[in-house]
């Protein structure tokens, strides 16, 4: 029996980030395929059977959430990581419910990504930091994401339910989420 390099599928529409991540993973001995949308990722699975997948939440055409159940059905043992610069509790819960094994917020280093994809949890090397309550801006971001998820991404309906103008909501959504 021959040992083969683990295969990682990277699905991210940020060309610079995905190229850098690909090179870093290849230097660490992984066989990597990079695609930039859900449809190409599904088509690629016919010839590339990944052991692990790193999936961006916000892709150009469709959400990375659409890919999770497809990969889980085709490859029941695959380790999947949802990676996003727009994290919220609602999208985290959705990703885990759909079958993702872990969820990380960008920016994340290759070491953090590999730790999140590890078969065994990596022991913490430092004590757990004290948790502080989220800021008011963070709570607002979480609430907007929850209502947007409930409305299946419909901006107009979400704006109506939140009592704000649609363009105001779109501007808020274009910004990066507020850190705690």
Image (cartoon, rainbow, N blue to C red):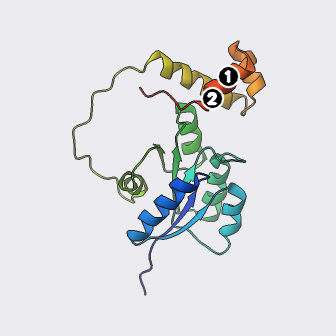
Disc 2 + disc 1, Cβ < 8 Å: yes
Q: Is residue 106 above or below residue 23?
A: above
Q: Going by the picture, which residue comes out furthest to the right?
A: 156
Which of the pair 10/50 is nearer the observer? 10
Circle 1: is it few (<14), some (14-19), or many (20+) Cα within 10 Å? some
Please name the residue shown 64% across and 64% down the image.
Answer: 74
> Can I make out residue 116 in this image?
yes
Please name the residue shown 47% across and 59% down the image.
Answer: 21
> Can I make out residue 54 in this image?
no
Please name the residue shown 49% across and 63% down the image.
Answer: 22
Circle 2: is it few (<14), some (14-19), or many (20+) Cα within 10 Å? some
Q: CA distance from mark 2 to mark 1?
A: 6 Å
The residue under label 1 is 169
Please name the residue shown 31% across and 53% down the image.
Answer: 122
User: Where the C terminus falls, by quadrant?
Assistant: top left
The residue under label 2 is 173
What count of labels does the image hold? 2
Dot 2: element: helix
Q: Going by the picture, which residue comes out furthest to the top?
A: 163
Residue 81 placement (x, y as % from top left) = 50, 52
Q: Is residue 91 above or below residue 157?
A: below
Dot 1: element: helix
Residue 176 vs residue 43: left or right?
A: left
Residue 37 placement (x, y as % from top left) = 67, 55
Residue 123 vs residue 41: left or right?
A: left
Residue 103 placement (x, y as % from top left) = 48, 45
User: Where the N terminus falls, by quadrant?
Assistant: bottom left
Which of the pair 165/160 is nearer the observer? 165
Residue 112 vs residue 22: left or right?
A: left
């Amino acid at each position: 029996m021959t040992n083969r390099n683990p295969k990682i599928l990277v699905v991210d529409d940020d060309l610079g980030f995905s190229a850098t991540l690909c090179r870093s993973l290849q230097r660490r001995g992984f066989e990597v395929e990079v695609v930039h949308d859900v449809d190409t990722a599904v088509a690629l699975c016919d010839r590339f059977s990944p052991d692990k997948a790193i999936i961006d939440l916000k892709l150009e055409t469709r959400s990375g959430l659409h890919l999770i159940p497809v990969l889980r059905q085709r490859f029941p043992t695959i380790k999947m990581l949802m990676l996003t610069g727009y994290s919220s509790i609602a999208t985290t819960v959705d990703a885990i419910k759909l079958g993702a094994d872990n969820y990380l917020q960008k920016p994340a280093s290759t070491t953090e990504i590999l730790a999140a994809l590890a078969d065994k949890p990596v022991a913490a090397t430092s004590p757990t930091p004290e948790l502080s309550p989220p800021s008011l801006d963070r709570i607002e971001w979480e609430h907007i994401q929850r209502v947007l998820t409930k409305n299946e991404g419909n901006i107009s309906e979400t704006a109506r339910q939140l009592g704000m103008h649609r363009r105001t909501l779109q501007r808020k959504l274009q910004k990066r989420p507020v850190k705690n």
